[in-house]
Image (tube, rainbow, N blue to C red):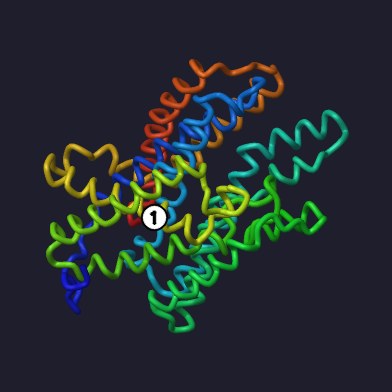
């Protein structure tokens, strides 16, 4: 595969297959979040196939968080705003945006409940300050900016990310004994199940590999041959990984089988599924043309807005109907709700983007 690379950059156009990978991740994400948050309101949900389908298959394996992080790394290579200061400034904004989302997703309802009951539970802290993928994305941008400031290239960053990933593979469920400390430290290492999501040590390797992929693909002249080889290699590895998963159980390569504490070996398996889909999308676009997939490309461009909207809708629905009205959501409601939310988030994000562009035409 490396024989297909040139020293100079010859392939700098937009990667529409990456857009489709992100679009698939958005669809899986919204369905997963709908099932994950609404499905818990009836007894025995852990043993339901439809809960497993939404939470595990769509939420862990089909291109979701790991695809977003890989795509973010590729984007770091393709962006024009790639100075260390650009990364750091954008990272700080994204990190803080994560806490803004926390407030509108569940935090506001937790505060209202606390004010009514006169007691603020630990879950209020989780709702307001729990780390999530936006906090991770912000930290990933900041640390990338620091690495760039130190003069490190993508290969150096990849080696560092592997060391981070190996360390994160062993530092799993490390409880400090203090809930607030767990939430804070949970941005870096995996603390407890309810205080840590997408810890930097475990997940930065996806970003770093995305960056390396970005510098490779920009130097590939014969993309057909490149993606054919990539499709074959990652397809074989993915089949082996899936077969072993059926034999040994979900996330069998990760300590405690805990998705958020993804190990280095598990990350490789998940990345192979992403790269297989990415390669498949390349040939699908080549066969049918880019114009057939303009909706998916638009979804990809509006990822952050869609992410914000869908969580706000789910948070409101879960808090009001699930906890206040104690409605037990059946799956014939949850899945149509998730599908409707995909369309609603897409169109609301479109309206938001159009309004933003009218106010700031230069951006």
Q: Nearer the viewer, residue 146 or 208?
A: 208
User: Which residue occupies 63% across, 50% down?
Assistant: 256
Residue 42 picture quarter: top right
Task: Tell me: 143 left or right of 170.
Answer: left
Residue found at the far right of this picture: 118
Q: Position of residue 288 (x, y in %)?
A: 13, 39
In this view, 86 is above or below 360? below
User: Which residue occupies 16% across, 40% down?
Assistant: 291
In this view, 256 is above or below 335? below
Task: Tell me: 221 left or right of 179.
Answer: left
Residue receiving disc 1? 271
- Label 1: few (<14), some or many (≥20) within 10 Å? many
User: Which residue occupies 41% across, 31% down?
Assistant: 342
Residue found at the far bottom of this picture: 151
Q: Is residue 70 visible?
A: yes
Q: Is residue 92 visible?
A: no
Q: Nearer the viewer, residue 165 or 295?
A: 165
Q: Position of residue 349 (x, y in %)?
A: 41, 38
Q: Nearer the viewer, residue 56 or 323?
A: 56
In this view, 168 is above or below 65? below
**Screen quadrant of the C terminus:** bottom left
Residue found at the far front of this picture: 247
User: Which residue occupies 78% across, 59% down?
Assistant: 176
Q: Secondary structure at mark 1?
A: helix
Residue 108 picture quarter: top right
**Screen quadrant of the N terminus:** bottom left
Q: Position of residue 168 (x, y in %)?
A: 59, 63
Q: Position of residue 275 (x, y in %)?
A: 31, 53
């Amino acid at each position: 595969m490396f024989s297909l690379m040139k020293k100079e950059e010859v392939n700098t156009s937009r990667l529409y297959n990456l857009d489709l990978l992100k679009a698939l991740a958005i669809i899986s994400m919204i369905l997963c979040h709908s099932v994950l948050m609404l499905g818990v309101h009836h007894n025995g949900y852990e043993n339901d196939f439809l809960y497993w389908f939404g939470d595990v298959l769509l939420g862990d394996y089909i291109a979701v968080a790991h695809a977003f992080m890989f795509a973010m790394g590729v984007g770091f290579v393709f962006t024009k705003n790639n100075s260390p200061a650009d990364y750091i400034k954008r990272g700080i904004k994204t990190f803080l945006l994560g806490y803004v989302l926390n407030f509108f997703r569940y935090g506001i309802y937790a505060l209202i409940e606390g004010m009514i009951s006169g007691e603020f539970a630990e879950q209020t802290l989780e709702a307001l300050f729990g780390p999530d993928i936006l906090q991770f994305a912000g930290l990933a941008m900041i640390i990338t900016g620091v690495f760039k400031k130190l003069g490190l290239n993508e290969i150096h960053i990849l080696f560092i990310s592997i060391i981070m990933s190996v360390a994160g593979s062993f530092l799993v469920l490390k409880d400090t004994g203090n809930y607030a400390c767990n939430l804070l430290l949970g941005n870096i290492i995996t603390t407890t199940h309810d205080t840590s999501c997408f810890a930097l040590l475990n997940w930065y390797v996806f970003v770093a590999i995305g960056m390396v992929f970005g510098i490779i693909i920009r130097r590939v002249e014969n993309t057909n041959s490149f993606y054919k080889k990539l499709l074959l290699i990652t397809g074989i590895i993915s089949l082996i990984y899936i077969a072993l998963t059926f034999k040994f159980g979900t996330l069998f390569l990760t300590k405690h089988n805990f998705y958020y504490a993804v190990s280095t070996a598990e990350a490789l398996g998940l990345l192979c599924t992403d790269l297989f889909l990415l390669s498949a999308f390349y040939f699908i676009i080549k066969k049918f043309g880019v114009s057939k997939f303009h909706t998916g490309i638009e979804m990809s461009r509006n990822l952050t807005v869609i992410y914000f909207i869908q969580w706000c809708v789910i948070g409101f629905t879960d808090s009001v109907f699930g906890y206040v009205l104690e409605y037990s959501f059946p799956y014939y409601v949850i899945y149509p709700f998730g599908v409707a939310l995909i369309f609603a988030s897409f169109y609301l994000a479109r309206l938001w983007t159009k309004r933003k562009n009218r106010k700031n035409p230069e951006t």
